[in-house]
Image (tube, rainbow, N blue to C red):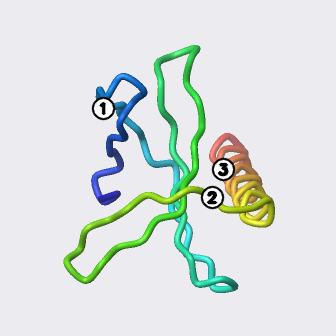
Amino acid sequence: MFDEGVFAIPGADGQPIRCEVLFTYDCEANGRSYVVYTFGEDEQKQIGANRYETNEAGETTLLPIENERERDLLAHCFEELKEKLRAQQAEAEG
């Protein structure tokens, strides 16, 4: 589902909302998989995150983040990713 870097979720009006994958994360500590993505246009762009599961047929289901511990885990991963990107940019500029 995330191989192309984009996927769609249903909006409140039933219309699909285009989402762009920032990263996926397989957490060894809890055995769950997560996707962090952006959606919306320009100034209205937002960041979303969901847990996901893929069944034996290869179909992926998005699931809600269940608790604060999962939110904290993803926030930590996102901060690490931002720091790595800053370091890469500084190295390229420098």
Residue position marked by numbered label 1 in the rendering: 16
Percent coordinates x, y for residue 44 in the rendering: 56, 17
Tag 2 and tag 1, C-beta contact below 8 Å: no
Residue position marked by numbered label 2 in the rendering: 65
Disc 1 residue type? Pro
Question: What secondary structure is marked by label 2?
Answer: loop
Percent coordinates x, y for residue 85 in the rendering: 66, 50
For image coordinates 67% across by 56% down, the residue present is 81
Q: Nearer the viewer, mark 1 or mark 3?
A: 1
Question: What secondary structure is marked by label 1?
Answer: strand
Q: As displayed, is residue 21 above or below residue 52? A: above
Q: CA distance from mark 2 to mark 1?
A: 21 Å
Residue position marked by numbered label 3 in the rendering: 85
Q: CA distance from mark 2 to mark 3?
A: 25 Å
| 13, 17: nearer the viewer | 13
Q: Earlier in the sequence, mark 2 or mark 1?
A: 1
Task: Say whether residue 53 is left or right of residue 1.
Answer: right
Percent coordinates x, y for residue 7 in the rendering: 32, 45
Q: Nearer the viewer, mark 2 or mark 3?
A: 2
| 5, 56: nearer the viewer | 56
Q: Earlier in the sequence, mark 1 or mark 3?
A: 1
For image coordinates 45% across by 48% down, the residue present is 21
Give me the disc on residue 46. Answer: none
For image coordinates 35% across by 49% down, the residue present is 5
- Answer few, some or many: residues within 10 Å of disc 1's Cα (few below 14, many 20 plus, some between 14 and 19): few
For image coordinates 37% across by 62% down, the residue present is 61
